[in-house]
Each structure stands twice: as structure tokens, then as C-alpha cells.
Amino acid sequence: MKKILITIIFVSLFVPMKSQSVYSKVVRYMRNNGGYSLSTAKYGYINKGEKFYNYKTFSAGLEYAIVAYSENQNVDVDLYLYDYDGYLKLKDTGSGEWALLNFSTWEQMRMKIVVKNYSYYGNAKCEVLIFYR
């Protein structure tokens, strides 16, 4: 249920993108409504089928939310989280211009975050924001 509520809210963030950037809207929403702080923000320009990745050490005992998106229209952004040994832990491969992963850690873990441009023909700017609380 929590994931569905967050999904509905994120969809509403992407529809009216006139005066503020998606980045600003997502950061403000996560801070004000989720109690999250921004940890890391990265981006990459990727063509269809390409991906970019980032390694991050996640601290023990915290809740994390990873948001990946593109402001380009018709980009299907997929998001994957792998442990240090290369095993897939979480993924969001739904269709759409954004993806979201939520998880908690019980011990410090170094993980690989992968963002993929699944369907956009062209060089799309895709961003990933990592939040914690």
C-alpha cells in the first residue's frame, strides 16, 4: 500500500513540470512528506539499451529510497540494485519515465545502482537520487 501511495504521488510530480524542475519537486516531496534527506544525486546521458551505474555504501539501520527519472518524454527508465557480489536485490522495471526502490539495511553494505534507458531513441539525461532517513 505504501508503494502504491508513493507511486501515485510521483506520477503527479511528473505531469505538471512547468515552473520547477523534477529534481526540486522530488527532493522537496521526499523531505516534507517522507522525512528523507538527500544523500547522493548522479546523472548520465544514455541511449536506448544503455545504462549507467554508481556504487554506494549504505549505512546500517537506515531506510533508503532511490528515485531514477528522466525529464525527456517517452523514456522508460529502469532501476536495479545489486549487492557487491553482483546479485540482484531489487528492481523497478515498470514502464514510465521514473522508477523507485525502497529498502532498509541491517548492516553496512556496498551496492551497485544501475539505471537503464529501456526504450528512448536518442541521448536521454537520466538522473538518480538517493535518499535516507
Image (tube, rainbow, N blue to C red):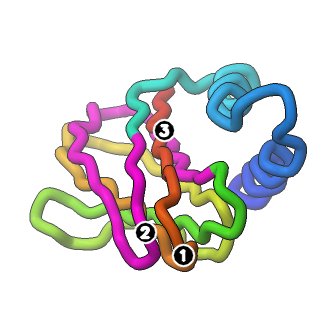
Q: Earlier in the sequence, mark 2 or mark 1?
A: 2
User: Is label 3 or label 1 in front?
Assistant: 1
Q: Are marks 2 and 1 in contact (CB under 8 Å)?
A: yes
Three-letter amino acid code at the position of disc 3:
Leu
Task: Give residue 18's quadrant in the image.
Answer: top right
Q: Which residues are magenta?
A: 43-70
Q: Which residue bears the numbered disc 2?
A: 47
Q: Which residue bears the numbered disc 1?
A: 121
Q: In the displayed structure, does residue 68 sit left or right of residue 13?
A: left
Q: CA distance from mark 3 to mark 1?
A: 23 Å
Residue nearest the observer in this picture, 124 or 97: 124
Q: Residue furthest front?
A: 122
Q: Earlier in the sequence, mark 3 or mark 1?
A: 1
Q: Which residue bears the numbered disc 3?
A: 129
- Secondary structure mostly seen in magenta is strand
Three-letter amino acid code at the position of disc 2:
Asn
Q: In the displayed structure, does residue 95 sit left or right of residue 105?
A: right
Q: Earlier in the sequence, mark 3 or mark 2?
A: 2
Q: Are marks 3 and 1 in contact (CB under 8 Å)?
A: no
